[in-house]
Image (cartoon, helix red, strand yellow):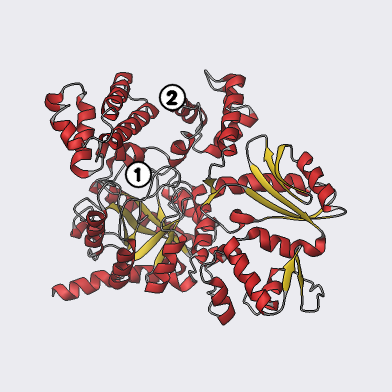
Amino acid sequence: MNCRDAAHALAQVAVLLELHDSDKATVKAMQAAARAVGGLDERDLHEALAVEFAGERRLPPEALAVLRDLAESNSSEMLERLQEETPEGLMEMLRVPGLGPARIRSLHEHLHIESLLELELAANDGRLASVPKFGAKTADKVRRAIADLRATGAFVLWQHARAEAERLATIMRAHPDVLRLEIAGSIRRRTELVRDVDIVAAVRGSPSVVAASLARHCGAQEVVGGGGRTLTLRLENGVRVDLACVRPEQFTLALWRATGNITHVQQVLSRAASLGYTLALDELRDGRGTIVPMADETALYERLGLAYVPPEQREGFGEVEAAATGALPTGVQETDLRGALHCHSQYSDGGASIERMARAAMARGLRYLGVSDHSQSNTYAGGLSRDRILEQHAEIDALNARFADEGTDFRVLKGIEADILPCGRVDYDAAFLDRFDFVIGSVHTRYGMNAEQMTNRVLKALDDPHLTILGHPTGRLLLTREAFEIDLDAIIAKAGKVGVAIELNADPHRLDIDWKACRIAADQGTMVSIGPDAHSPQGFDNLELGTAIARKGWLEPRHVLNTRTADEVLAFARARRVAADTRAH
């Protein structure tokens, strides 16, 4: 590692320390160390520690500890601990110009704000102005800073983009000349990150006139592109909107085209041309030039001899060929899920009791809840000691007995999210792991390992017969942390071979594995578990996006572990242990 990269790590540590209200002197010392190390630019860190910073000159001991950690393992235990202790949304808020760690901490403490979307809502509804040392002027600055961030074309998480799109859609649908309006583009395709909002409207009268009227109606600050019936708008809050207004009979093709992606559209257009059709001005014409009416997108695909391709799958990734041969899979739906296997409670870093989480899962139509709090090594997320595990298991037994007495068809399973330690061992010993119904193994430390080291670490963990699910396999946090280096293909192949499910972590900040890796898992015959990573009852909402990403990755119900019954999940987990015991004897 060079000194420039090490300085960046020190600066991140300083920001997170300030975010956690650490001692000011420590924060300043870390900032000064970052500047000193950064001044050496491309200099090798080992060399700098041996020469410039020998004998602990110029740098405080905390910074030296971080640097030695980085030099030895390419990662920092302190940085990783701080990142894990910090809600993902607070990291996202650090992207807002002028909103530093101290102010974000204040907002989190006073208003419990944990995301960019919540920040914007608080700035708009007056709550932000009520926070000490903020006021109306600061709230207005925050609003403008978020708008500036969006105006740069910065990506946002899918859930935030959808919320803004739905707000706009509600406003536009109220326009008297709008007959039908739908959200299109990357939001409709469920892409993980979104840059702008695409909206298509069927209108009464002249499309260009209505488009201009809608621009005024929704408070567009500026028309930055397009003209006529298609406009690109920039709203006051910085959101960019691509708006297309069409006649009602053009709506189907306009929505299909605006949904994209461009590769998919081009492939379908090529097929249409090969069959003698042309598509122009959102109208399909046959070889005689006659317009072919299209009631909906299903009719379009059917006309071209294709099975209907759901919006999530329109990525130019083989779906057109599959639709032509009847090989397009029937994607998993949220209603196919029978349970949730990655959920946290107040025992570790969750915000609700086990019973409250169970009843929330029940209300969502699920039949079982897999409680998987953090293991003992994960001290910064409230990892559970053995005594606390035994206490939790007794509570689960009592809760299950009460459900049975009530005649409630619901079950709580005893799980754990056990750390995969740097050596590849799964936290807790084998005898204690036997107490759990299922085990999720996740990497939470030493993200800086090289690809060979990290791959070997996880491959070793996969050999543990107690491991049921590999949690968030790449460790990424969208917009805030890159995936660690790992040979994911080798991991997916090994998991399928030994009978471990790979998690599609449905937290919108993670979506890990991504949809392309889902395709690989399906091809390899490796089971996938769609885990909400719920830390509160609201966390079950993550399942909507999780199943959409699974469909995007061509996963069918048969590919997904938690479409199975609780007994079938338990059998899946026990199979490895039984096989290991058989080999041992």
Give the residue type that dot 1 points to.
Ser
Q: In the figure, 339 relative to 422: above or below?
A: below
**Residue 46 vs residue 15: left or right?**
left
| 535 lies above or below 122 | below
Q: Where's residue 469, x and y in %?
A: 34, 61
Mark before the other along the chain sequence, 2 or 1: 2
Q: Secondary structure at mark 1?
A: loop
The spot of residue 532 in percent (x, y) is: 45, 54
Look at mark 1 in the image and give the residue it sits on.
348
Q: Quadrant of residue 278?
A: bottom right
- Say what secondary structure mark 2 lies in: helix
Question: Which x, y percent locates residue 369?
Answer: 43, 58
x%, y% of residue 309? Answer: 60, 70
Q: Given the image, on which type of amino acid does mark 2 rest?
A: Ala
- The quadrant of the rendering that contains the N terminus is top left
The nearer-to-camera label among 2 and 1 is 2
Instruction: State whether residue 111 is above or below residue 396.
Output: above
Quick one: 560 or 297, which is closer to the camera?
297
Depth order, front residue of 514/463: 514
Q: Which residue is mark 2?
A: 102
Q: Nearer the viewer, residue 329 or 269?
A: 269
Q: Is residue 211 visible?
A: yes
Q: Is residue 52 left or right of residue 300?
A: left
The residues bearing labels 2 and 1 have C-alpha atoms spaced at a distance of: 26 Å
Say left or right for 85 vs 269. left
Dot 2 crowding, Cα within 10 Å, few <14, some 14–19, many 20+: some
Residue at 78%, 51% (x, y): give it: 229
Question: Farthest residue in the bottom direction?
Answer: 325
Quarter of the image with the C terminus is: bottom left
